[in-house]
Image: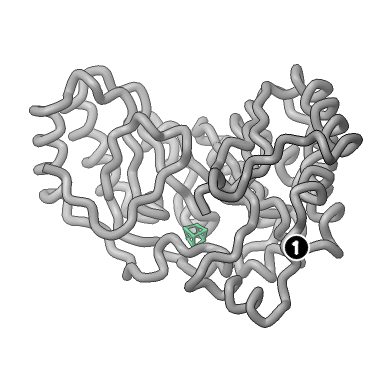
Amino acid sequence: MIRYEGQLYRPPSEADSLILQATIGCSYNRCTFCAMYREKRFRVRPLEELEREIAWASTNAAGYVRKVFLADGDALIAKTSFLLALLERLRSAFPDLSRVSCYASPQALAVRSVEEMRALREAGLTLYYLGIESGHDTVLEKLEKGVDSAEMIRVARKAGEAGVKLSTMILLGSGGRALSQEHARESSRVVNAIQPRFVSTLVMTPVEGTPLHEQAARGEVDELTPLELARELRQFIDGLELEGSIFRSNHASNYLALAGSLPKDKARLLAGLDGVLGDPEGARFRPKRLRGL
Ligand code: SF4
């Protein structure tokens, strides 16, 4: 059987994927807002353990497995030889496998060469989830993301060059009130430079156990209202110049769940947000109890 260690996280779009913990924790583990792997010490799991779990899943659910998500936070940092071996086992166990994906930190993207990412893509690892969070350098620094916007663009483009699809995330509200509009504008700039296949937003939320939560307790964090977040989101979408991407704000942290293809649906998304901003009383913001927080 598959034994999961600690709390498991996956993107919303991996709800029907087989989740395998190729690594435990996140090798970086320093982003101030991230509570996901605080308690875990990073390590790559032995291939033999994963082989046993793949064999179990193959016996019990081979016909159902079309997608595999490699957890935890940063599987791309594992050695390419390890990942290639793992992908080979997955392909032979699951004949209907159509994609394998993982989270990729900017640090992991910096370490992997384009050739390595291309080889991994040819072996089935075709999608990375990348938390850009913000395109604003001051905000990135405050979040302790470990990279500035120029480096974020550089490493993300490496994945594009290797033919790997990117699903990127922007953290609404992470600039606070003072930088809200600049954070939105700069985030559009960075996303435009990367041209990811998928773009989504999350809302920054101080979660217990994180440095962000401590900052919030000291009164150092502005938590934007749903209306301020809608204004920021409008600015962000307005600045997007994408050639073929899918936008979603379906993560539980969002107050508004929007979806569309860009550039096709840009005007519709903006009109929807204008409707919210023009009639805040009538806006249907997702209540806190449904935001899963
Ligand atoms: S790189 Fe990702 S998983 Fe790791 S601490 Fe930052 S946000 Fe969390």
Give how far across and how far down residue 133 sits, in percent. Answer: 64, 53
Q: Residue at x 73, y 46 (%)?
A: 190
| Residue farthest along the front direction in this orientation | 281
Q: Which scheme is used to colour this image of the protein?
A: one colour
Judged left or right of residue 97, residue 118 is: right
Relative height, residue 197 to residue 36 (above, below): above
Residue type highlighted by circle 1: Asp
Judged left or right of residue 235, residue 18 is: left
Give how far across and how far down residue 17 sits, in percent. Answer: 33, 32
Relative height, residue 32 to residue 257 (above, below): below
| Visible residue check, residue 28 | yes
Q: Which residue is mark 1?
A: 137
Q: Residue at x 10, y 35 (%)?
A: 55
Q: Residue at x 68, y 34 (%)?
A: 195
Q: How many marks?
A: 1
Give how far across and how far down residue 228 sits, in percent. Answer: 81, 51
Q: Secondary structure at mark 1?
A: helix
Quarter holding the N terminus? top left
Callout 1 crowding tier (Cα within 10 Å): few <14, some 14–19, many ≥20: some
Give how far across and how far down residue 76 sits, in percent. Answer: 40, 50
- Report if the beta carbon of the residue with label 1 is closer than 8 angstroms to ligand 1: no
| Residue farthest along the bottom direction in this orientation | 218
